[in-house]
Amino acid sequence: MALVVSQPDRKRGRGGRLRPTPVKAAALELGLPVTDRVDDVLDAGADLGVVVAFGRLVRPHVLAELAMVNLHFSLLPRWRGAAPVERAILAGDEETGVCLMRLEEGLDTGPVYACERVGIGAEETADELRTRLVGLGSELLLAALEAGLGVPVPQEGEPTYAAKLGPEELHLEWSRPAVELHRVVRVGGAWTTFRGRRLKVHRARLVPPGAEAPSPGVLEATVVGTGEEALELVEVQPEGRAPQPAPAWLRGARPAPGERLGT
């Protein structure tokens, strides 16, 4: 019997209503049974468990009873952990991928059945990259199941770890180089301040090297100075308002000459 294990319902959106995860909602629509208790798989009569971005450790007593595989969105052992897509972008990696591995008690330490590599686009956001990896991983999993999993190979190389990002890592420090700040924006959730209120930056682009740039944090139209080169704002979200194109925000905000972000 198929059984879907998902995170518990959580309060989401305005009004704080309890809402199911997208995984649970999709499973219910398909008529599949759903639980938030991992131990329930022991009575499901399943032959194999498939784990994808579950966010919780599966205990040894469950792994002892049911073999499990995990789709992980990195080229293991690089970026084990909770935020492999975001960490790959922040590090400036030019490629990443998806690996199908045997689930073990350790954090993404299991041997690998198969991997696929993909390049990371220079403007690609974490959400866009994750969507590509989901499609690639689904194909990889189905092909592996159809052909038989075979014998997994131990991971080789120096492990790196992808800890979950905190809000301060998404803070745009304008003294940093533009190329680093651009990566933070691509990860999602980047923010700065303007006149004491938070301003989210959803999209930005690098200004071509060599162009004259304002001082770090200073706004000149949609261009912001940084510690090295400059960044052009494309889409922003003022506190308490909807996302909007940067030129529309500027028409309303009317920054004074020399006014800075981060204040």
Image (tube, rainbow, N blue to C red):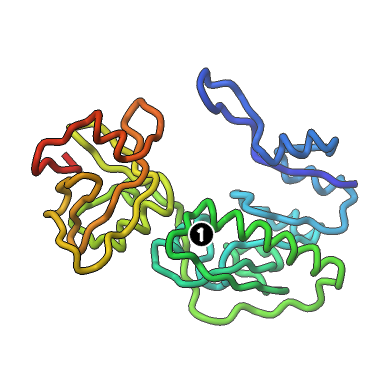
The answer to which of 31 and 192 lies nearer the viewer is 192
The answer to which of 29 and 2 lies nearer the viewer is 29
Left or right: 86, with 104 as reference point: left
Q: Examine the rendered structure and indicate whether residue 64 appears above or below residue 36.
A: below
**How many badges with numbers are in the image?**
1
The location of residue 67, given as percent across then percent down, is: 79, 62
Q: Tell me which residue sits at (82%, 58%) in the image.
A: 48
Q: What secondary structure is found at the residue carrying circle 1? A: helix
Q: Quadrant of the C terminus?
A: top left
The answer to which of 31 and 10 lies nearer the viewer is 31
The location of residue 14, given as percent across then percent down, is: 51, 21
Farthest-out residue, top: 15
Q: Tell me which residue sits at (23%, 38%) in the image.
A: 193
Q: Tell me which residue sits at (69%, 80%) in the image.
A: 153
- Amino acid at dot 1: Val
Left or right: 137, with 243 as reference point: right
Mark 1 is surrounded, within 10 Å at the Cα level, by few (under 14), some (14 to 19) or many (20 or more) other residues, namely many
Left or right: 203, with 26 as reference point: left
Q: Tell me which residue sits at (69%, 68%) in the image.
A: 101
Quarter occupied by residue 52 = bottom right
Q: Examine the rendered structure and indicate whether residue 38 appears above or below residue 104.
A: above
Residue picked out by circle 1: 85
